[in-house]
Amino acid sequence: MLEVDGIHTYYGQSHILFEVSLSLEKGEIVGLLGRNGAGKTTTMKSICGMLHPRKGRLVFEGEEVTGEKPYQLVRRGICYVPDDRRVFADLTVDDNLDIVYRRTGEWSRDRVYEVFPPLKEIPGRRAGFLSGGEKAMLAVGRALMSGPKLLLLDEPTEGLAPLIVRSLEEQILRLKDAGISILLSEQNLKSSLALIDRAYIIDNGRICYRGTVKELENNEEIRKMHLML
Amino acid sequence: MASLADLFSSGTLSQFLVGLSRTTILFIVSSGLTLILGVLRIPNLAHGSLYMIGAFLAYSVIHFLGDGTAAFWAALVIAPLVVAALGFLLERGFFSYLYEREHLMLLLLTFSFTLIIGDLVKLVWGAEYRSVTVPRVFQGSAEVFGLPLPYYNLFLLLIGPFIAVFLWLVVNKTKMGKIARAAAVDSEMVSAVGINVGWVFAFTFVLGCFLAGLGGALIAPMVNITLGMDHSLIMEAFLIVIMGGLGNIWGALLGSLIFGLTQSLGILVWPQFGIVFPYLAVVAVLVVRPKGLLRSTW
């Protein structure tokens, strides 16, 4: 479904990603694991069009999409949920959902509220005043409104209380059941173990390991070297 | 200096109302400026030039249609629309390619536009003064608390709140307004939820230019329409916008009120130096609140 083929991404002069390749099939949850600053967010931003790789290709559903802008990729079905959420603080919860471009009629505000019931209680609250957990839900809900085929979730559970993490993870699994593919970044294996089917490990801007969760669990050396334990 | 008793005389009130009506123009123009500044982050020096074009266009339309009241109404619609169309061309033709650039570059570009537009206006309308007579329906004065207030000032007093409500509705109740507010803070994320931000920017710029043109058309019957009217206004509009908080429409309203009223009341207090008061007010506001009175989107 998604094919990232040897991309090199720069921030100005500094070379951040080196020859990053990864792929994702329909209905999969794939982990992108790595330490802080390893290149997870840069990889995600390169896929969603916020950053444009200088070299390499992106192919989505058989079509080359390299160099397209974020809004064009959203219209193809790729939607990014940033690690810092970036909800529209001035707008209410309802408005955050309403302004999203809707690719299909599949998702509505009511359906998002069904997935994240706590949001249903506060439709008129400004997003800037939400709790961390509510912001995380709103950020994912906002992405869902666009009717994504592929969600890029950048550390969705970062900074949340364990109870909220669990409920968010449950919802992420429900999204998978609904047929949405997910690329999920996390700093450690443990927090994503329940969710992902297989994983890539990224370190210093390079993919240094790829494999199933089982293989990764058994390979302590790799985990120690590249992940936070 | 006037004595204290004079300050509370009947003249104060009428001066206050005339000042308030001038505030309307300042508000209309500076709300457009602040809208563009807030959402597109363009410090548009050419905003005053668009206001000047609005005034000249109003003059031309009124003369072309034969000076009647109907001609005035037509000018009030046509002039802002033409200015808005011009804004659309500027945005699509120049600014849409330059959003990534730093503000200084944009500032220089808009400055060059003020020079070019100034010369173009001179080419089209010439260097002489132009004037428009107050349309017949607005000739004469109304009695307000026993004082004469020209009908045209009264009309401006009424149109100010109307524009404020209109802007409030556009910004808070329409989808485009909501998107523009989101884009003012985080345009990249707006793009990342599937919205073509370019069109949001174009819409906002066009709306801002429309307001500049409307301000120009509204002031036409009150002043000599002349080259250079852009310079004095853009200075005032920028001060108002800075005083109110960059990008905040209500800040523009507040700033216009402070600017317009200190000016008209200052004249009463100390006629020779009346013009100084609004600038003193700006200094006072910025000393107390360096980022402006209301929350800036910057």
Image (tube, rainbow, N blue to C red):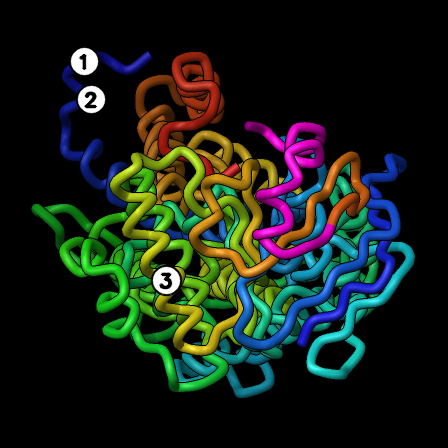
Residue drawn at the location 77% of the way across and 64% of the way down: A4
On the image, numbered disc 2 is attached to which residue? B7
Side of B223 relative to A162 (left or right): right
Q: Give the residue type at disc 1.
A: Leu
Q: Give the residue type at disc 2.
A: Leu
Q: Give the residue type at disc 3.
A: Gly
Q: Quadrant of the N terminus of chain B?
A: top left
On the image, numbered disc 1 is attached to which residue? B4
Alpha carbon distance from label 1 to label 2: 5 Å
On the image, numbered disc 3 is attached to which residue? A141
Give the label, 3 or 2, closer to the camera. Answer: 3
Are the residues flagged by discs 1 and 2 in contact, CB closer than 8 Å?
yes
Name which quarter of the figure residue A28 lies in. bottom right
Of all chains, the one bearing label 1 is B
Front residue of this view, candidates B146 and A28 = A28
Bin the neighbour count of mark 2 within 10 Å (Cα to Cα): few under 14, some 14-19, many 20 and up.
some
Of all chains, the one bearing label 3 is A
Bin the neighbour count of mark 3 within 10 Å (Cα to Cα): few under 14, some 14-19, many 20 and up.
many
Front residue of this view, candidates A105 and B76 = A105
Alpha carbon distance from label 3 to label 1: 62 Å
Residue drawn at the location 58% of the way across and 43% of the way down: A217
Callout 3 secondary element: helix
Q: Position of residue B65 (x, y in %)?
A: 54, 87
The reply to whether the magenta stretch includes residue B114 is: no
Residue drawn at the location 45% of the way across and 55% of the way down: A195
Bin the neighbour count of mark 1 within 10 Å (Cα to Cα): few under 14, some 14-19, many 20 and up.
few
Predominant secondary structure in magenta?
A: helix
Q: Position of residue A87 (x, y in %)?
A: 42, 50
Callout 1 secondary element: helix
Q: Which residues are magenta?
A: A210-229
